[in-house]
Image: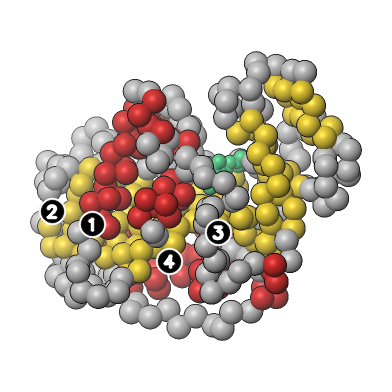
Amino acid sequence: MTFDDFDVLDWTTQKVGAPASWPEPGDSGELDDGTRVEFWDYGVFALTPAQPGSKDVILSCAIHGNETAPIEMVRDMLHDIFSGKLQLRQRTLFLIGNPQAIMIGKRFVDYNMNRLFSGAHKSGDTPEHKRAADIESYVTKFYNEAPADGKRQRLHYDLHTAIRDSAYEKFAVYPFTHGGPYKKEQLTFLAECGVTTILLNQAPTTTFSYYSVRSHGADAFTVELGKVRPFGENDMSRFADADRMFRKLISQDQLDLPAFDATRHTIFDVYRTINRTQQGFRLNFPGDVANFTEFEQGYLLAVDESVEYHVEQPGERIIFPNADVAIGQRALLTVVELPLDQLELV
Ligand SMILES: O=C(O)CCC(=O)N[C@@H](CCC(=O)O)C(=O)O
Ligand SMILES: [Zn+2]
């Protein structure tokens, strides 16, 4: 198979006029260095180096179709692997989540796909419900097919960009651990990516990253790398640290991370999840208020018809506000800072 003219995004979005030599889903090929490339589906690339290391890595993007910077990062990594510029060392599943939403430049077509994991896709039949079910099966296949040769590490970084500006430009959601300890190695890896702000989710969710944690025992994170912009408008220099570290992760045996340094990390605990339950739900602050903005105690944050949500805690900050979500979905999170010494770390 020749990869010379292969364009990952054109293939993923089934661009009209693609060369007949391009693969079909189900095809596979081999790179000059012996890396096996399997095209499981549009946007789903399972790569196995000739001598795989001990990590099974998933790098996903475009679970929201308009979050273009992570798509460009993943596309460029794949092109560099196909051209021999980047040599793979770890088994890696690259997953471009929602090609149909990419084609229309929207977060989603019918339904927010990041609310459809851990089986939630069974409750409907939109293209996103179908794709979330398929993605779960690809993740299961990828982790199940890992070599049975001793201790392996399952990793999954689900790359996003946020709708609005943020007081902390880059941050990661650490999915609910069900009381399990937080990992210093993962916090350090994220910090090396430029992600030093961490949100601890304290409940099960239907997000992709929680699915990988809960169903596959992976170390998995939703990683917010900046702000949503259209293709061509991303300043990729702002993603350079993350790009460098993800490339290192998949191309090297060992990461040789620096020692854990507690002073690098800012930790927030999710204090409340506010869902929109009524048609008349509204947020009581302007649309351009940045993520992590703090409001004074008592401030009215949102009104869900007759129910008012006021700031309850000193230092309570808002994140991911969106009054426009479907009824029943999360319209706002609030977080409070947590001293790192209160975390159980391993
Ligand atoms: O900027 C926003 O309002 C949303 C950005 C985004 O897509 N965030 C993820 C977070 C997922 C998680 O909580 O792990 C989402 O809302 O799906
Ligand atoms: Zn997103």
Instruction: Report how far apart the C-alphas of labels 1 and 2 lie in the structure.
Output: 19 Å
Find residue 28 and name its label. 2
State whether residue 157 is above or below residue 52. Answer: above
Q: Pointer 4: what residue?
A: 246
Instruction: Report how far apart the C-alphas of labels 1 and 3 lie in the structure.
Output: 25 Å
Q: Pointer 1: what residue?
A: 144
Which type of secondary structure does the marked residue at label 1 adopt? helix
Is the CB–ligand 1 distance for label 1 below 8 Å? Answer: no
Residue 252, percent from left and from top: 34, 77
Give me the residue at 55% from left, 66% from top.
182
Amino acid found under the numbered disc labelled 1 = Asn
Q: Earlier in the sequence, mark 4 or mark 3?
A: 3
Instruction: Report how far apart the C-alphas of labels 4 and 2 lie in the structure.
Output: 24 Å
Residue 256, percent from left and from top: 45, 83
Is the CB–ligand 2 distance for label 4 below 8 Å? Answer: no
Q: Residue 261: name its quadrant.
A: bottom right
Q: Earlier in the sequence, mark 3 or mark 2?
A: 2
Q: Disc 1 vs disc 3: Cβ atoms closer than 8 Å?
A: no
Q: Residues within 10 Å of mark 4 (few under 14, many from 20)?
A: many
Quarter holding ligand 1: top right
Q: Pointer 3: what residue?
A: 179
Give the number of the mark in front: 1 or 3: 3
Q: Is residue 180 left or right of residue 140?
A: right
Give the number of the mark in front: 1 or 4: 1
Q: Earlier in the sequence, mark 1 or mark 4?
A: 1
Q: Is residue 288 left or right of residue 110?
A: right
Give the number of the mark in front: 1 or 2: 1
Instruction: Report how far apart the C-alphas of labels 4 and 3 lie in the structure.
Output: 28 Å
